[in-house]
Amino acid sequence: MTQKPASDAAGIRLNRWFTDQGICSRREADRWIEGGRVAVNGAPAVLGTKVGPKDKVALDGRVLVQRTARPIVIAYNKPVGIECTSDPKVPNNLLDAVAYPERLVHIGRLDVMSEGLILLTNRGEIVNRILRGEYEHEKEYLVELSQPIADDQLSRLARGVDIGDGKGRTKPCQIDRLGPATLRIVLTEGRNRQIRKMAEAIGNHVRRLERQRIMNLRLGTLPRGQWRHLSLDEMRELFLSLGMGEPRGVTRDIDTRPTLPSSSLVRIDSTSEQRGSLRPSGRPPLSGRPTRGDARPARPDLTARPQSRSGRPPR
């Protein structure tokens, strides 16, 4: 006798179950469900189906094992040229670049021409709590513009501008001048290509954009193209900020040293923003900053321990 899916009064939504298991995003899960690829207890799933711990979820006829794995969050220093997508068909996609041994989901995005801090995790709840706009979590960026910015233009950006996305003016933000054309910008919202569009709204253009902080988590001295696990103290502060209590299964001896993925980087011509200029290369980018394969030493690691290249998950 075929079992029925869990009732709507119990469990969690099926698309959230997929993200909690670190399998895919909610949007991708919805596409799978609509495409008839997902079944619960032998019955075809529909949008809104809920599942509990005892339900059996199958994708393309293969039953997926529910797991209660320890929470994993890693910080990755994304180089220019890496696409923030988990689609394996996209060249230079984020998951291939990180090459983590377990399935992770990236938290938010940086466009292909931007660089800096990206977080990845195996817990969908962490993704949802960081990205929900009402929490207004801070994200800090170093921004280099193509031409100097006047004080009145800076004040205009800080108050909020219309970037033409149909959502009205951007929220007020903190902007510090670091030079004639260099700014530190702290946002509490995350619209598509927001900073680039803000610059365009005042007749300027972004030459370089690097995300340096998400909430309490900083890029620090993490070398470009490498990732590290968050420390126990960082995990505790993150979970507390997200209202998730104490992180379970994370030990203090977690290895937080930068890890060098085995996948090759891409190099992008800084004179063009056309994606056709992306190409694999072992040489450093034209910006002159060191990456893998560059003979110049990277910035010192605050942990003062040698780099690990094992790529193993924390014990």
Image (tube, grey):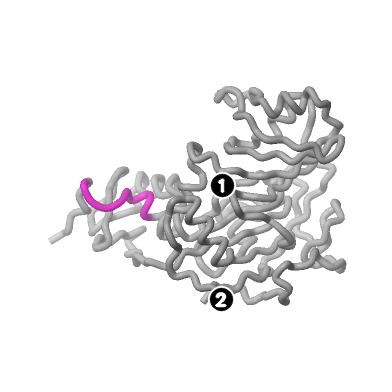
- Residue 243: where, in percent of width, then height? 44, 51
Can you identify the residue that label 1 sits on?
A: 108
Q: Quadrant location of residue 19?
A: bottom left
- Residue 98: where, in percent of width, then height? 62, 62
Q: Quadrant location of residue 288?
A: bottom right
Can you identify the residue that label 2 sits on?
A: 253
SS class of the residue under badge 1? loop
Bin the neighbour count of mark 2 within 10 Å (Cα to Cα): few under 14, some 14-19, many 20 and up.
few
**Quadrant (top left/top right/bottom left/bottom right) for the N terminus:** bottom left
Q: Residue at x 86, y 32 (%)?
A: 147
Question: Label 2 is placed on what type of residue?
Answer: Asp
Q: Is residue 183 magenta?
A: no
In the image, taking residue 33 as reference, residue 109 lies left or right, namely: right
Q: Nearer the viewer, residue 182 or 165?
A: 182
Is residue 91 visible in the rendered structure shown here?
Answer: no
Q: Which residues are magenta?
A: 9-17
Q: Residue at x 80, y 40 (%)?
A: 144
